[in-house]
Image (spheres, rainbow, N blue to C red):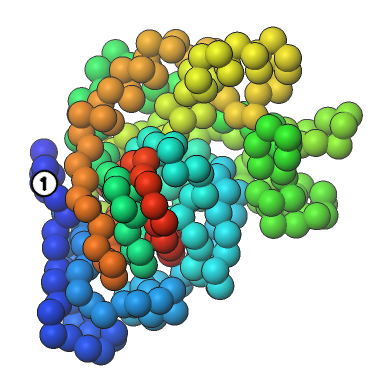
């Protein structure tokens, strides 16, 4: 496969550079991102979220806001967010950021301010390799049918719509959905359901390589711990699960297919231990990321463009 790098990210280390803007001189490395997919910048004297924002902004990209999110995170300041705020004991499976919607960041940066005592790595996997390793029958069906993501918003079971859409105004939610090709419906209890159809695979705009780009393995009900899944199905029913995914024609996806996809991600994953000050830059189309469980305090912040 053209450009595939089966090792750790390309590492750019600076033992002596003091100017944060020196990163703009690393054009040769940045130009290689569509090939390597991930670059780890180390020893660039970054000690705070503000340093990180200056660093990420040095690539000439406008840092975006976290809209239509699916996981809890907090805004540090404009363009900078905490990493996903799940409990330390929970592993976050590999995924491409916001690949469950039609608008997603093309670039994502992670900055480690404080590594955890144990664990807490950010494993990555090449989405080109994942695409190639998905069993062909599964890959062909996903490619042909696409996906339908269904979300039910509720503070009791998942994220409330006010947090996801960054507004308390239902009309603003409806406008956002209309602008982004998302079907919506207000339920009798005042809660919201959205439905959006998206492709399961994409071609990279620069390299034209096919990538596996979706979150079916995260949204599908089989991702829920079995006893909790049964409880939710018995109490709220499939239609009201916090999130679920179907093929684009509305037909169900077999649990076995999702298990096979998860296995491919696990086999393709590589990881490295964080060091304080590290910045990991990803081409979001080419590289999936996750989070290992950890102990001790861990502080990682994120920017997207």
Q: From the viewer's side, name the closer residue of 276 and 101.
A: 276
Above or below, comparing residue 215 to residue 138 in the picture: below
Left or right relative to 11: residue 73: right
> Residue 183: in sight, yes or no?
no
At mark 1, the secondary structure is loop
| Location of residue 134 by image quarter | top left
In the displayed structure, 239 sits above or below 44; it is: above
Specify the quadrant of the image occupied by residue 126: top left
What residue is disc 1 on? 7
- Residue furthest toward the bottom? 19
Quadrant showing the N terminus? top left
Quadrant, the C terminus: bottom left
Q: Nearer the viewer, residue 190 or 111?
A: 111
186 left or right of 66 in image: right
Q: Is residue 83 above or below residue 58?
A: above
Residue at image location 60% in from the left, 11% down from the top: 230
The front one of 69 and 1 is 69
Q: Where is residue 210 in the image (x, y as percent from the top left)?
A: 26, 38
- Other-residue count near label 1 (Cα within 10 Å), few / some / many at <14 / 14–19 / ≥20: few
Task: State left or right for residue 149 relative to residue 234.
Answer: left
Whole-percent x, y for residue 253 in the image: 47, 14
Q: Name the residue at 52% across, 49% down.
A: 85
Q: Where is residue 221 in the image (x, y as percent from the top left)?
A: 54, 20
């Amino acid at each position: 496969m053209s450009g595939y790098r089966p090792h750790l990210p390309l590492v750019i280390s600076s033992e002596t550079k003091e100017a944060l803007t020196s990163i703009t001189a690393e054009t040769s490395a940045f130009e290689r991102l569509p090939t390597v997919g991930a670059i780890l910048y180390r020893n660039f004297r970054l000690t705070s979220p503000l340093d990180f924002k200056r660093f990420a902004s040095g690539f000439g990209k406008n840092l975006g806001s976290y809209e239509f999110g699916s996981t809890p995170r907090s805004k540090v300041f404009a363009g900078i967010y905490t990493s996903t705020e799940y409990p330390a004991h929970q592993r976050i499976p590999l995924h491409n950021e916001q690949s469950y919607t039609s608008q997603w960041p093309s670039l994502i940066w992670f900055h480690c301010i404080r590594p955890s005592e144990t664990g807490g790595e950010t494993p990555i996997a090449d989405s080109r390799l994942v695409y190639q390793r998905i069993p062909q029958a599964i890959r062909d069906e996903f490619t042909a049918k696409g996906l339908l993501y269904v979300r039910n918003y509720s503070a009791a079971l998942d994220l409330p719509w006010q947090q996801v859409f960054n507004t308390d105004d239902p009309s603003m939610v409806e406008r956002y959905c209309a602008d982004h090709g998302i079907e919506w419906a207000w339920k009798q209890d005042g809660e919201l359901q959205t439905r959006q159809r998206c492709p399961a695979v994409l071609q990279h705009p620069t390299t034209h390589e096919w990538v596996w780009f979706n979150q079916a393995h995260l949204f599908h009900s089989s991702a829920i711990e079995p006893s909790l899944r049964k409880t939710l199905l018995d109490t709220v029913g499939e239609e009201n699960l916090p999130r679920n995914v179907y093929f684009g024609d509305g037909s169900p996806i077999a649990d076995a297919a999702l298990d096979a996809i998860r296995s491919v991600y696990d086999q393709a994953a590589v990881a490295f231990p964080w060091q304080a000050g590290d910045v990991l830059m990803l081409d979001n189309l080419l590289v999936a990321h996750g989070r290992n469980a950890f102990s001790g305090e861990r502080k990682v912040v994120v920017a997207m463009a």
